[in-house]
Image (cartoon, helix red, strand yellow):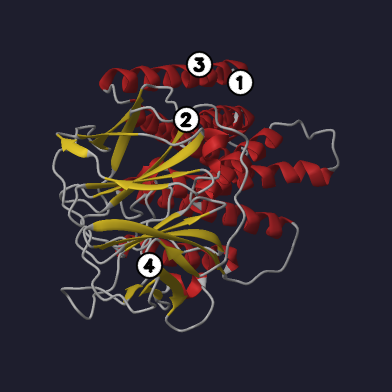
């Protein structure tokens, strides 16, 4: 009977995989949304199976004399094997399709890197738990139980980061899951109590059950009664720092963006059409209404891999699609950052990579820490208002103001007639040279609302993710006499 049950479970796993695949490929033609849904379902399936596997151990210990508990324990290894299958499917879709594979790994926010790492660790723990430890020393036999629990922990952390169903921890599915965890912990505590009783180990009269019950109920109560408990956006294309952008609209609304370049294999100096189409991630419907952000519906920033090329442009809007024709100056991998805000939703940021021509092996440019430079007719200095070194923690906490000071390069006279550009006296972008994390900041209000200068001040703040230490390329855009110019610097953020 046990063999038949195991075969039946594997057969059901195959039917579930095929059925889910056919279902999502039939209901939507949007590849990004289709793979996001498959990734979520496979990840949740792995998580549920690991949970059932963890529950089998204490259940068999407490109720081992019952036939159903013996059968449950006999298929425990099959459950972890099927869980490994779905964990591998989930990880492969998330990493190779949604997050860009190895080429896109360095382009991700650390939150998503940890998600992938936890996914790999969960799969590795499941694989090790499948090893036959019966001929090993008793320590390793008990270690298998530890591996199963470890797989559950890693799979849960993976879900909290990469699965949209866990975005709002007070939603139905997370509540059910946390109730399940509470049941698991209490049954495990009861099994531990029983194990200690059999070995005549003295414990508190209240037992471990009571202690764990208080912890679990406190934890569950916090998430049940705190309606604002949400996690950072887990949209795969939102894995870039959105620091400095305005946090407005409903953050629970999710979106996905498809990107296409025409021709598909662009060359340097060639006119390339870039098209971005926005969808509601929940319904799959195209999004057509947007809010204006600093005079434009969508901002597109393009940089090359060396961060020596910078271009800030604004695609045209038609329906749910934004299109623009542009050129790329040389062979290489380019990073594209989008900022837009659908009506009723929060401001969104998406990132894409685009190989152009034959990208050479990456050669980082030499770091130039000069903070006073001449750009055409302007001598521009970059400093902090407090005179201290650039500090990631202070910038994240909105406690360090960045100051651009403008002078005439020939006379040294202060420049006081900067003009507004896209609704502000400047736009500032910081990009980490190693991780390509993207920070977009707008200036503080000018003392003179008509003209800007001789200083333009920016206040970074970690609205969505902390600014991390590292070397950053700084691109400031300003306007004078009807001409927009860029001032670029390289700074070491401690």
Instruction: Tell me which corner region of the image, top left, top right, bottom left or bottom right, holds residue 199.
Output: bottom right
Work out whether mark 2 precedes mark 1 in sequence or the reverse, and give the earlier one. Answer: 1
Residue wearing tag 3: 11
Q: Which mark is residue 390?
A: none
Judged from the image, the secondary structure of the residue bearing numbered disc 2 is strand
Label pair 2/4, CB-CB below 8 angstroms: no
Residue wearing tag 4: 378
Q: Which marked residue is nearer to the observer: mark 4 or mark 1?
A: 4
Point out the image quarter for the N terminus: top right
Point out the image quarter for the C terminus: bottom right
Q: Position of residue 214 (x, y in %)?
A: 48, 68
Judged from the image, the secondary structure of the residue bearing numbered disc 3 is helix
Name the side, left or right, on which 344 lies relative to 493: left
Label pair 3/2, CB-CB below 8 angstroms: no
Residue lying at the far bottom of the rendered structure: 386
Marks 2 and 1, Cα distance to the nearest angstrom? 56 Å
Marks 3 and 4, Cα distance to the nearest angstrom? 71 Å
Residue wearing tag 2: 356
Characterize the local packing of mark 1: few (<14), some (14-19) or many (20 or more) Cα atoms within 10 angstroms: few
Work out whether mark 2 precedes mark 4 in sequence or the reverse, and give the earlier one. Answer: 2
Q: Which mark is residue 2?
A: 1
Q: Residue at x 57, y 46 (%)?
A: 118
Label pair 4/1, CB-CB below 8 angstroms: no
Q: Which marked residue is nearer to the observer: mark 1 or mark 3?
A: 3
Q: Residue at x 58, y 31 (%)?
A: 84
Marks 1 and 3, Cα distance to the nearest angstrom? 14 Å
Work out whether mark 3 precedes mark 4 in sequence or the reverse, and give the earlier one. Answer: 3
Q: Position of residue 12 (x, y in %)?
A: 47, 19
Q: Is residue 60 visible?
A: no
Q: Position of residue 324 (x, y in %)?
A: 26, 35
Marks 4 and 1, Cα distance to the nearest angstrom? 80 Å
Work out whether mark 3 precedes mark 2 in sequence or the reverse, and give the earlier one. Answer: 3
């Amino acid at each position: 009977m046990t063999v038949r049950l195991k075969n039946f479970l594997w057969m059901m796993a195959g039917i579930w995989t095929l059925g889910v695949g056919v279902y999502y490929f039939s209901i939507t033609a949007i590849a990004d949304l289709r793979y996001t849904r498959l990734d979520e379902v496979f990840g949740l399936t792995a998580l549920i199976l690991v949970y059932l596997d963890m529950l089998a151990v204490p259940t068999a210990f407490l109720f081992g004399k019952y036939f159903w508990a013996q059968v449950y324990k006999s298929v425990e290894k099959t459950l972890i094997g099927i869980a490994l299958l779905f964990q591998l499917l989930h990880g492969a879709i998330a990493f190779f399709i949604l997050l860009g594979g190895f080429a896109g790994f360095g382009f991700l926010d650390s939150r998503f890197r940890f998600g992938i790492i936890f996914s790999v660790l969960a799969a590795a723990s499941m694989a090790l738990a499948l090893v036959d430890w019966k001929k090993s020393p008793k320590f390793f036999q008990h270690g298998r139980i530890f591996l199963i629990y470890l797989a559950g922990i890693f799979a849960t952390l993976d879900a909290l980061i990469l699965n949209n169903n866990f975005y709002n921890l007070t939603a139905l599915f997370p509540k059910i899951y946390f109730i399940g965890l509470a049941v698991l912990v209490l049954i495990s505590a009861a099994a531990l109590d029983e194990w200690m009783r059999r070995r005549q180990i003295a414990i508190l009269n209240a037992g471990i059950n009571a202690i764990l019950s208080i912890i679990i109920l406190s934890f569950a109560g916090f998430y049940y009664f705190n309606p604002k408990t949400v996690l950072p956006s887990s949209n795969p294309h939102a894995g870039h720092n959105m620091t400095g952008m305005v946090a407005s609209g409903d953050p629970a609304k999710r979106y996905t963006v498809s990107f296409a370049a025409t021709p598909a294999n662009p060359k340097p100096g060639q006119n390339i059409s870039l098209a971005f189409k926005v969808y509601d991630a929940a319904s799959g419907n195209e999004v057509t209404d947007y809010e204006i952000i600093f005079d434009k519906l969508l901002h597109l920033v393009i940089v090359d891999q060396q961060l020596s090329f910078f271009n800030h442009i604004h695609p045209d809007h038609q329906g749910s699609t934004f299109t623009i024709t542009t050129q790329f100056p040389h062979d290489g991998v380019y990073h594209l950052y989008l900022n837009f805000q659908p009506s009723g939703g929060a401001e969104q940021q998406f990132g894409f990579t685009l190989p152009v021509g034959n990208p050479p092996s990456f050669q980082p440019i030499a770091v130039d820490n000069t903070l006073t430079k001449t750009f055409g007719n302007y001598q521009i200095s970059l400093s902090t208002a407090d005179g201290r070194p650039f500090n990631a923690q202070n910038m994240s906490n909105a406690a360090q103001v960045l100051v651009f000071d403008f002078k005439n390069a020939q006379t040294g006279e202060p420049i006081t007639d900067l003009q507004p550009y896209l609704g502000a006296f400047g736009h500032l972008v910081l990009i980490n040279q190693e991780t390509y994390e993207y920070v977009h900041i707008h200036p503080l209000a000018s003392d003179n609302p008509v003209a800007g200068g001789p200083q333009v001040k920016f206040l970074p703040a970690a609205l969505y993710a902390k600014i991390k230490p590292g070397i950053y390329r700084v691109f400031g855009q300003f306007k004078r006499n009807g001409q927009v110019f860029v001032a670029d610097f390289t700074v070491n953020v401690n």
